Image (spheres, rainbow, N blue to C red):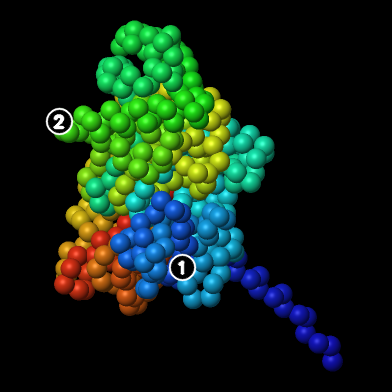
Amino acid sequence: MEDPPALPLPEPESEPDPDPEASPAPPQRLLRLRCAVQHYEWGQRGAASLVARLADQNPDPARPYAELWMGTHPSAPSTLLDDGTLLSDWLARNPDALGPAVAARWGVDLPFLFKVLSVAKALSIQAHPDKKLAEVLHALRPSTYKDDNHKPEMAIAITEFRALCGFAGIEELKDVLRTFPEIEGLVGHEDTGKLMNMKEDDGVSEVKSSLQSAFAKLMTASKDMVSEAVAKLISRLNTKSKIRTLTDKEQLVLSLERQYQDDVGVIAALFFNYVKLSPGEALYIGANEPHAYLSGECIECMATSDNVVRAGLTPKYRDVQTLCSMLTYKQGFPEILRGVPVQPHVRRYTPPFNEFEVDWCLVPPGGLVVISPVPGPSIFLVITGEGEIQLDFMSDGEKAEEGDVFFVPAYTEVKISACGPESVQLYRAGVNSRFFS
């Protein structure tokens, strides 16, 4: 007896084609981060430093705690708190956490670096190169210029925060030259005369040429000339202080000289805008713009880079020629950001750079804030208070308190509640929302 003919097997059901517009599912895990502290000499010491209070339960009272780094930069990379894995390695294995647009633009890495700064002593007069110059400098001196990326940045004041930022306007600069005759002794009569004859309607290139020439001569003056000029200036100001109240810039000169004796930066500081930020105010700094943070504590966010070209107020390597040639020599007071409310209890600081933006969130006692999903990664830092953080895939919230740092994948809703008697204050760094629009 013959076997019956075999019946054809039914074809397996095909999987539906994925929707190209659908958001990829991020890895469902709340990542707590352990973040590195930089002990630069200019940092505030011991428990007086916010960086120390956030990062160390028992800070050394004699040690400076200058910066807390949150991100993937190899100079001070963050790791996962539970197993010590580098965040950068975890992202390489879980690229969906970045979102497709971010991964396509910047690769499998965070495009931003998030920091807290506690400044007791002036940082160097410095600028950060644009992308093209960063690539050149990194190739020439990789031990000094650690990467090939640009470093636009933004600082948001937590306490009163003081900084030098950009060249002062023409009329203020003329007033400085009249008030501080020691400058002419270093710059020379001809260059001083050109600056004094500048007008608001002069061409940009003409003004830049005069300012660049004078500033370069100041920054390259001999040590003996600088030492003599600073000594004369300090003596004159000390005498004047017995007769009248010194101006802000005169007081600044005395303060800088106490920190950096005989440094050309003491006089160079007079060329720049002296900026005082109140808590909640911010400034941003583009490529090739001179600046120096002076005092106070701030949140800082920037493109992922550690490239700094220094020329004064520092014991570190000074690349004066590069700094003087790279600057834009734009004049005028910097734009001050105060944040834009995006929902109750949340203000957003949006600089003109694709890599980053920062949200400042203040959740009142018993309150709840829901942060809607965004198509890029975020890092959250709790500054004060005690509460809970809950991601949309979690059945229960997890404790969030001062010093906690969390990485949140793209396309993830975040709920933050305040459980204690005080408000929960936290900051979120993420990719600039303009990049996605």
- Marks 2/1 in contact by CB < 8 Å: the verdict is no
Residue at far right of view: 1
The amino acid type of the residue labelled 2 equals Arg
Q: Residue at 30% of width from left, 31% of height from top?
A: 235
Residue bearing the label numbered 1: 34
Q: Residue at 19% of width from left, 65% of height from top?
A: 423
Which one is nearer the viewer's eye here, 65 or 61? 61
Instruction: Tell us which disc is closer to us: 2 or 1.
Output: 2
246 left or right of 166 in image = left
Q: Quadrant of the C terminus?
A: top left
Residue bearing the label numbered 2: 244
Element type where label 1 sits in the image = strand
Residue 130 placed where, x, y %?
52, 33
User: Looking at the image, is mark 2 or mark 1 earlier in the sequence?
Assistant: 1
Mark 1 neighbour class, 10 Å CA radius: few under 14, some 14 to 19, many 20 or more: many
| Residue 316 in view in this figure | yes
Which one is nearer the viewer's eye here, 199 or 149? 199
Separation (CA) of disc 2 from disc 1:
51 Å
Q: Residue at 32% of width from left, 75% of height from top?
A: 399
Q: Which mark is residue 353?
A: none
Q: Is residue 17 above or below residue 253?
A: below
Residue 142 placed where, x, y %?
65, 44
366 left or right of 401 in image = left
Q: Is residue 334 above or below residue 423?
A: above
